[in-house]
Image (spheres, rainbow, N blue to C red):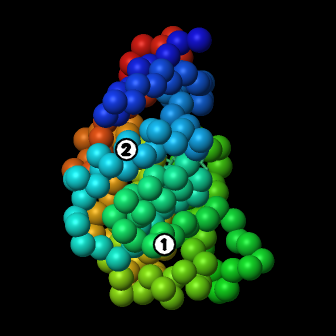
Amino acid sequence: MQKYRITVGDQIRDLPLIPISDDTAIASFVLLGDDAMSRTAAELLIKKLPHKFDYVVTVESKGITLAHDISLLTNHPRSFVIRKSVKSYMKDPLTTTVDSITTQGQQQLVLDGADAKELQGKSVILVDDVVSTGGSLQSAEKLLKLAGCQIIAKATILAEGDAAERDDVVFLGKLPLFNLDGTIK
Ligand SMILES: O=P(O)(O)OC[C@H]1O[C@H](OP(=O)(O)OP(=O)(O)O)[C@H](O)[C@@H]1O
Ligand SMILES: Nc1ncnc2[nH]cnc12
């Protein structure tokens, strides 16, 4: 299997190239369970982010450990997770749709109404493990604006494809997209 090497601080990973359509493959970066990578990335991102903010917010699921680590390392006792489905324990959830590079068809993004209430008027840092098309970030921003909070920074570990040209997102490294033969697009 072809691999693409990334280095984040002292963490080196050989990511497998996985086809996601009939002309594109991604270097699959699965942060869930990779606790050393999450912790290292959090430490490095914190140095690039504003020092003063109220909360870290992320999108389910692979951004969760990163949000958790940034939040605790900056002495914030809680963070918020925008979910991908409505749960019965939510109160008056805010919902929108999302398109992401890894998922065929639209998914839902959901902010629990109770969380929206706590976020109202607060300054937040929105984080995710990878930004690619920007669809997930855009939908999350929409929900956070509906909740009435101010996004003071957006951060990710890897900016993939065209996202590497973005200047509104803080990131640690670039990740190319690939042709099916493993060459870089
Ligand atoms: O910029 P985009 O094109 O939206 O891609 C980035 C999103 O894709 C991944 O999530 P994914 O949809 O794979 O869901 P998961 O984290 O639940 O696995 C990643 O964690 C980002 O949230
Ligand atoms: N390269 C990648 N690996 C895992 N999830 C992703 N979401 C978007 N790009 C991704």
Which residue is drawn at the image coordinates 57% and 74% (left, top)?
111
SS class, disc 2: helix
Q: Is residue 78 visible?
A: yes
Question: Mark 2: which amino acid?
Answer: Ala
Q: Relative to residue 93, is residue 180 drawn left or right? A: left
Q: Which residue is mark 2?
A: 41
On the image, which quarter does residue 51 sit in? bottom left
Q: Is residue 178 visible?
A: no
Question: Where the N terminus falls, by quadrant?
Answer: top right
Question: Where the C terminus falls, by quadrant?
Answer: top left
SS class, disc 1: loop
Q: Position of residue 167 (x, y in %)?
A: 22, 50
Whichever of labels 1 and 2 marks the residue nearer the N terminus, that label is 2
Residues 134 and 22: in front is 134
Packing grade of label 2 (10 A; few <14, some 14-19, many >=20) is: many
Q: Position of residue 17 (x, y in %)?
A: 54, 21
Q: Which residue is mark 1?
A: 78
Residues 34 and 84: in front is 34
Packing grade of label 1 (10 A; few <14, some 14-19, many >=20) is: few
Q: Relative to residue 65, is residue 86 drawn left or right? A: right
Whether residue 172 is situated above or below residue 153 in the rendered picture: above
